[in-house]
Amino acid sequence: MEIHPPTKPIESVKDFFLHLFMITLGVLIALGLEQTVEAWRHHELGVQARENILNEVRDNKRRIDGARRAVAKNAERRQSSLNVVREYLAHQKLAHAEMSILINGATLSSTSWTTASATGALGYLGYADAKRFATAYYIQALLEHAQDDEYQTAIRAFALLKYSPGGPATLSDEQLRSVERDVLDYLGQLTFWQQLAAPLSAEYESVLKAK
């Protein structure tokens, strides 16, 4: 913004106030235009952040719904694996024993949410939108934490079954009880995962419908 001095000498009080008025008006117009441009920029940032988050939520919902179907489909196989471990513990002779520790879960993203938070774009979304998004991502964080615990337990149980010399039949009772505890923990953690996945999917749906 540039302010130019009068092009001719000020010869009266009237001229002085006229020039003062013109300068003040120019300053106010310039400030108003600058604020308008800044407000529009903030609006655009909010619109872009909202669109990015909605796309991310849409992708996450597709992934979590797919994982929920897979978990439900494999329930019988997980229970069968636990039964086989218990049959080994009972020293039963098994003609055929199949054990599979299935790792179920969903790879969810929070990049758009964390980027909007880091750049301050969340402040341009509006309270209602920001609150809905925050609720969905909070439940998502809980589920991802539970999922990490589930993976660790499944890997621990699978490692002992898979890499023991001679296979499960050669494991000691103590080792089999350890596997049984891990499988039980895994099943419990997976149940907790399912209990979180259902409301998370519903929260995603609520966010997408509110757009």
Image: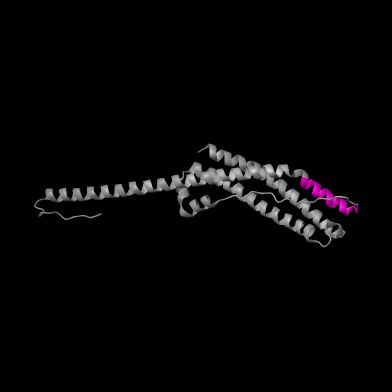
- Residue 130 pos. (x, y %): 51, 45
Q: Quick check: is 41 in the magenta stretch?
A: no
Q: Quick check: is 87 in the magenta stretch?
A: yes
Is residue 1 placed above or below 61 in the rendered structure? below
Quarter location, residue 164 = bottom right
- Residue 134 pos. (x, y %): 55, 47
Quarter location, residue 197 = top right
Q: Residue furthest top?
A: 209
Is residue 152 placed above or below 28 in the rendered structure? below
Q: Residue 194 versus residue 156: which sits nearer the camera?
A: 156
**Position of residue 52 in the picture relative to residue 41 (left or right):** right
Q: Residue 84 versus residue 211: which sits nearer the camera?
A: 84
Q: Main secondary structure of the magenta part?
A: helix
Stretch of the chain drawn in magenta: 77-92
Q: Residue 130 versus residue 155: which sits nearer the camera?
A: 155
- Residue 146 pos. (x, y %): 67, 51
**Position of residue 5 in the picture relative to residue 97 (left or right):** left
Q: Which residue is located at x 62 percent, y 43 percent?
A: 200
- Residue 69 pos. (x, y %): 68, 42
**Position of residue 7 in the picture relative to residue 31 (left or right):** left
Q: Which residue is located at x 43 percent, y 48 percent?
A: 45
The answer to whether residue 134 is seen in the rendering is yes
